[in-house]
Image: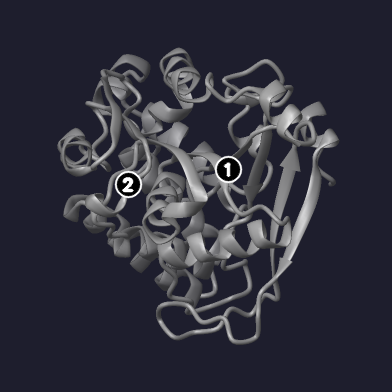
Amino acid sequence: MASIETPEETVGRDVHAAIPEDFRLESGQRLATTDVVGRLHGPDHAPLVVVAGGISSGRFAARWWPSVVKAGGPINLHHLRVLAFDLLPGRGAPGVTITTTDQARLLALLLDALDERRIDAFVGASYGGCIGLAFAAVFPDRIGELAVISAAHRAHPAATAWRGVQRRLLAFARDCGREAEGIALARQLAMTTYRTAEEFDLRFSQTPPPAAGDAWPVCDYLIARGAAYAEATSADRWISLSDSLDRHSVDPRAVRCPLTVVGFSSDTLVPIEDLRDLAARAPNLRRLIEAPSIFGHDAFLKERERVSHALHDVLNTLSLPSREIAA
C-alpha cells in the first residue's frame, strides 16, 4: 500500500546527487547505489537548514519528526528551506562499513548538486547529530549554526555493548532465513535502551501472564513495536548503520561553528557526561541544555516543548526577508 504524504511532504520536492565513480568510503569500499536522495521544502531563497535524525530517519523529515518540522513549527517550513536526506547504505547492500564522516561527505555531494556552498544551520538528533558533528569538522566553511540533540562526539562503550548484541541477533536471524523475526527482536531490544526503567514502571503493571513463556504487559508493548518495525529495514542495513554509530568519533575541538548541545539526564545510550565533555571542549559553544525526562534517548522525539524552545533559540536569528533581499 502506498504511504500517505502529509501536506508538508506534498509541497516538498526530491533532489538527487550522483555519487562519483571514484567516491570511496573511509573503509575503501564503494557504495552500490549511484546517487544520494534528499527532499527540499520551503520558500526559495530562505535560509537553508539541514535536518537529520536517527538511523530510522530519512528524507521525509515531516514524517519522522512531525512535532518539529512543520509549517509554523520550531523548524518552520514557512520561513526556512529544509533539506533532509536518505541515509546510506540502502536495503540491498550487505557488508557496508560506513562512518558518520562518509555520511557528511555524501551530504556535501547533495549540497553541491543544489549549488549550495554553505548551509545556515544543521539540526541533528541521535545519529543525525553525529553526522552534524562530522560535517562541521570536515566542512567548517560550509556550516553556520549546529544544534545536536541526544548526540555526542563519541560512542559510549555501554551503548556499543547493547548495539553489538543487536547486530549479532540480526546476523544470526538473517543467516537462519528468519530475517524479519530477527529485525523485530532486535527492535524490541533496542526499545529497552531508547526508553527508561522509570517510564516502564509508570506504564506497565507486573500482572503475571497465564503461563511461563507468555508475554508480560511490558513485553506486549515491545512485541508490538518490533512487529511494526519488521519491514522497515533490512538486517544488513541495520548492521551497517548500527556499526556506524559505534565507529563515530569526532574531536570536539574540530567543531568550530557555533554549537548548541541538548541532552537528557536519563539517556543511557548517550550519557549526559559525554555531552558535558563535548560542550566543555568545543571552541564555540553557544549553550549546553540539560533536562530531565522519563523518555531516555527518545526524549528528542517526546519532549516536544523542551526541544522546540531549544531550536527556537538556535534558529530565530535566521530571517527570510534578509535572504530575499540578498538574493
Checking the image for residue 50, the label placed there is 1
Q: Residue at x 41, y 66 (%)?
A: 99
Q: Position of residue 28 (x, y in %)?
A: 44, 86
Q: Position of residue 75 (x, y in %)?
A: 60, 26
The secondary element bearing badge 2 is classed as loop
Coloration of the structure image? one colour
Seen from the viewer's position, the closer of residues 26 and 87 is 26
Whether residue 215 is visible to the viewer of this picture, yes or no, is yes
Which secondary structure lies at badge 1? strand
- Report whether residue 155 is seen: no
Look at 66% across and 44% down and name the residue there.
83
Q: Which amino acid type is shown beneath numbered disc 1?
A: Val
The quadrant of the picture occupied by the C terminus is top right
- Disc 2 marks a residue whose amino acid type is Arg
- Give the residue pinned by disc 2: 256
Frontmost residue, 244 versus 279: 279
> Is residue 5 found left or right of 246 in the rendered image?
right
**Among numbered discs 1 and 2, the one appearing first in the sequence:** 1
From the viewer's perspective, tell me whether residue 84 is left or right of residue 163: right
Task: Give neighbour class at mark 2: few <14, some 14-19, many 20+ (Cα, 10 Å).
Answer: many
Q: Kindly identify the residue that appears in the image at 51 percent across and 43 percent down.
A: 53
Q: Is residue 199 above or below residue 164?
A: above
Disc 1 crowd rating (10 Å Cα; few below 14, some 14-19, many 20+) is many
